[in-house]
Each structure stands twice: as structure tokens, then as C-alpha cells.
Image: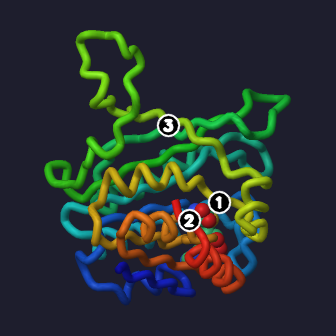
Amino acid sequence: MTENKIIMGDCRKELKKLKKGTVKLFVTSPPYNLRKEYGIYADSVHMEEWKNLIRETLREAHRVLSDDGSFFLNVSPVPDKKTKEIIPLDSIAWQLAKEEGFFLRNKIVWHFNNMQNCTRRLSGRWESILWLVKDLNNYVFNLEYVKIPVITQNDKRFDASSGRNPTDVWYFNRVNNMTKKKLKIEEHPCVYPKEMIERIIKMSSNEGDWVLDPFVGSGTTMVVARNLNRNSIGIEINKDFENIIDKRMNNETL
Ligand SMILES: C[S@@+](CC[C@H](N)C(=O)[O-])C[C@H]1O[C@@H](n2cnc3c(N)ncnc32)[C@H](O)[C@@H]1O
């Protein structure tokens, strides 16, 4: 049996109530400042405000994480609202994470194809996932649970049965409207794919550990964590999403 806690509120306040060193893994995708419909949270704030949100979240997360814990932060390059210049949110977030005492273990490129086409620049087809650790010499890495099939089955140099390292470039389709309709979660504007979160949770935590998502949205991180026998905490500021999270926790298995 696992414990699963949905906390409705601002993660900057709610994280302060959690005990030091109790969570093994944070996985999250914060708002990207893209004017998405999150209700109470205005997803269109000055860059300094966005930086403060990420900085404060990272600071509290660093305290709450165990010494061998990891933080996976999914952010995307986004166009500036006025000039359309591309802002590399991952570079900004990395700087903030460094200042809060984290080390970058990998910058993972999440590649996908199902996205709109641009006419005045190259079409965007990736987002970043920053894998941050508290200690470069002490962190959970269950490589054996996330290996993928070898490329050349007949290559005698490799034992084809053991699989290979999934590398730092990952292909997962984005969750499209059809999938959201099937899961009955159309109300949430951006949901990340369960398969991708499954890889992260298997790789960087063990059964019985606590997994926390401070911007839990529709509850993807909690659903996957629970299905992998991890305890989970999800924090969400928009009360309208509580029902969606509840519904998904009751209905979805891997
Ligand atoms: C990108 S979405 C997360 C989606 C999630 N990964 C999923 O698969 O459903 C970001 C979420 O953060 C929430 N949010 C924004 N500011 C917050 C804050 N200060 N504390 C907690 N949640 C917040 C938004 O309401 C939104 O649901």
C-alpha cells in the first residue's frame, strides 16, 4: 500500500510545511509563462516573477530532498510575448538551480513530432528536462530498469538481451487532445506523457520512496508514482484540477 497526498495550495508555502530530507525525487513541469489557462495562476508574468517562482521552489525542494535525491525539471524554450525572441528557460532555470546548491547530472532533450509548424523560424520539436542532484557522488540511478533495446541485435560486442543506456535524447509523443479526451482530462491545458515520467521514476527512486510534484496539474506524476509503488505528494494551486487528479488516481493504471 502506498500513501498519496494531494495538497491544494501554492507550492512555495506548502513545501515549507514538509520535513527536511524526506523526499527522494521531485518531478515537475512548472508553468512556462505561455498564457495557458491555469485559472488562478496568471501564466503571463514578468520574467523576474517567473524566476522567483522557480528559485523559491528549488530552494524549498533542496531542503525537503534526501541527500541522495534528484529533481527533474521539465521546461521548454519559449517565444517572448512581444518580440517573439526565443527565451531558453532551461538555461535560466539551470542558473537558479546552481545558486540553490544543485548540480546538473544530465540535460535531457525530450524530442517529439506532434506540434504545430512555424513559418518564420524552424519548428520547435524539443523540450528540456534538467536532472539535478544534491550530491554528484550520491544519487539513485537504476540504469538496469530503464534500458532500451540494442540497435544492432547481431552485434557480437554487446549482449543484446541486457539492453542499452537510453541516452540523454528521449522520444515521447506529446499528450494530444485525443488522448486527453480518452482520459477525460480535456480541462487541463498541458499534460506530460506518463511513459516519460515512468522512466524517470524507475530510474531515480525505489519502491516505497516519496515522489513529489510541486506543480502537479492533472496529477500525472502522482498516478505514475502510485502505479510504481512509490508514495506521492502533488501540490496544485488551482482547485478546479483537484477533481481531475482524484479521478485519474482512481481510474488509471499503467
Ligand atoms: C505545466 S502544468 C503541470 C502539468 C502536469 N505536468 C500534468 O501532467 O498534468 C503546471 C501547473 O502548475 C500549477 N501552478 C502554477 N503555480 C503554482 C504554484 N505556485 N503552486 C502550485 N501549483 C502551481 C498550474 O495551475 C498548472 O496546473
Q: Check residue 63 in the rendering and tell me which mark sits there, or answer none.
A: none
Q: Is residue 170 above or below residue 180?
A: above
Residue density around tag 3, few if under 14, some if 14–19, many if 20 or more, within 10 Å? some
Secondary structure beneath dot 1 equals loop
Q: Which residue is mark 3?
A: 170
Residue at 73% across, 68% down: 185
Q: Is residue 117 left or right of residue 91?
A: right
**CB of residue at label 1: within 8 Å of ligand 1?**
yes
In the rendered structure, are the residues bearing label 2 and label 1 in contact, judged by CB atoms less than 8 Å apart? Answer: yes
Q: Position of residue 182 (x, y in %)?
A: 75, 61
Can residue 48 be seen here?
no
Q: Check residue 220 in the rendering and tell me which mark sits there, or answer none.
A: 2
Q: Which residue is mark 1?
A: 191
Q: Quadrant of ligand 1?
A: bottom right
Residue type at mark 3: give it. Trp
Q: Earlier in the sequence, mark 3 or mark 2?
A: 3
State the CA–CA distance, disc 2 to disc 1: 7 Å
Q: How many numbered markers are drawn?
A: 3
State the CA–CA distance, disc 3 to disc 2: 18 Å
Q: Earlier in the sequence, mark 2 or mark 1?
A: 1
